[in-house]
Image (tube, grey):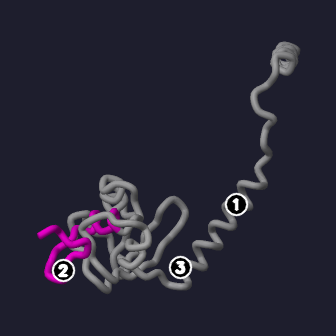
Amino acid sequence: MSKTKLAADDDKVRLDKWLWAARFFKTRQLAHEALELGRVLVNGERVKASRVAREGELLQIRIDKLVYNVTVLGLATQRRPAAEARLLYSESEESIAAREHQIGLQKAEHASFPYGDGRPTKKARRDIVRFKDSW
């Protein structure tokens, strides 16, 4: 009999493995590092990567500047397609709204940066050298 994609209630799933299976991190190593650095909080507390994930727990996951507040709905031992991974957790409406607001701010900040014209041409490079030498 093959392994099931969802763990049974009595199975134990490490938190770093659950974060990987729920597709918050691309590798288990990245999930492990996030837990060790305190970027993932369980019920508001820092935990070790080896901690067992349980249904109903509240997780606060910080990835770059984005914060996800999720509740664990199911346990998984294997990484499955994204559509199935979304069934493992539910995210609060406030968290979704705050994250979308943060993404909008980041896009606005990025759009306000002046972009250069790319690599200088030979003529522009000569002008830069002449300008620097004139000082």
Please indicate whether residue 123 sits to the left or right of residue 95 in the image. Answer: right
**In terms of sequence position, does the residue under pointer 1 or pointer 3 come before the other?**
3
Q: Secondary structure at mark 1?
A: helix
Disc 1 and disc 3 in contact, CB within 8 angstroms: no
Q: Looking at the image, how many numbered discs can be counted on the residues?
A: 3
At 70% across and 60% down in the image, what residue appears?
Answer: 107
Residue bearing mark 3: 95
> Mark 1 belongs to which amino acid?
Lys
Please indicate whether residue 134 sits to the left or right of residue 36 in the image. Answer: right
Point out the stretch of residues depicted in magenta: 1-21
Residue 54 vs 130, above or below: the answer is: below
At 32% across and 70% down in the image, what residue appears?
Answer: 46
Please indicate whether residue 108 sits to the left or right of residue 12 in the image. Answer: right
Q: CA distance from mark 2 to mark 3?
A: 28 Å
At 36% across and 77% down in the image, what residue appears?
Answer: 88
At 34% across and 62% down in the image, what residue appears?
Answer: 20
Labelled disc at residue 107: 1
For residue 7, which quarter of the picture? Answer: bottom left
Q: Position of residue 120 (x, y in %)?
A: 79, 25
Q: Position of residue 44 (x, y in %)?
A: 37, 78
Q: Position of residue 67 (x, y in %)?
A: 50, 70
> Mark 2 belongs to which amino acid?
Ala
Residue bearing mark 2: 8
Sort mark 1 into few (<14), some (14-19) or many (20+) by Cα contacts within 10 Å: few
Circle nearer the viewer, 2 or 1: 2
Q: Position of residue 101 (x, y in %)?
A: 65, 73
Classified by dominant secondary structure, the portion drawn in magenta counts as: loop
Please indicate whether residue 5 sits to the left or right of residue 63 in the image. Answer: left
Image quadrant in which the C terminus is located = top right
Looking at the image, the residue that sits furthest to the left is 1
Circle nearer the viewer, 2 or 3: 2
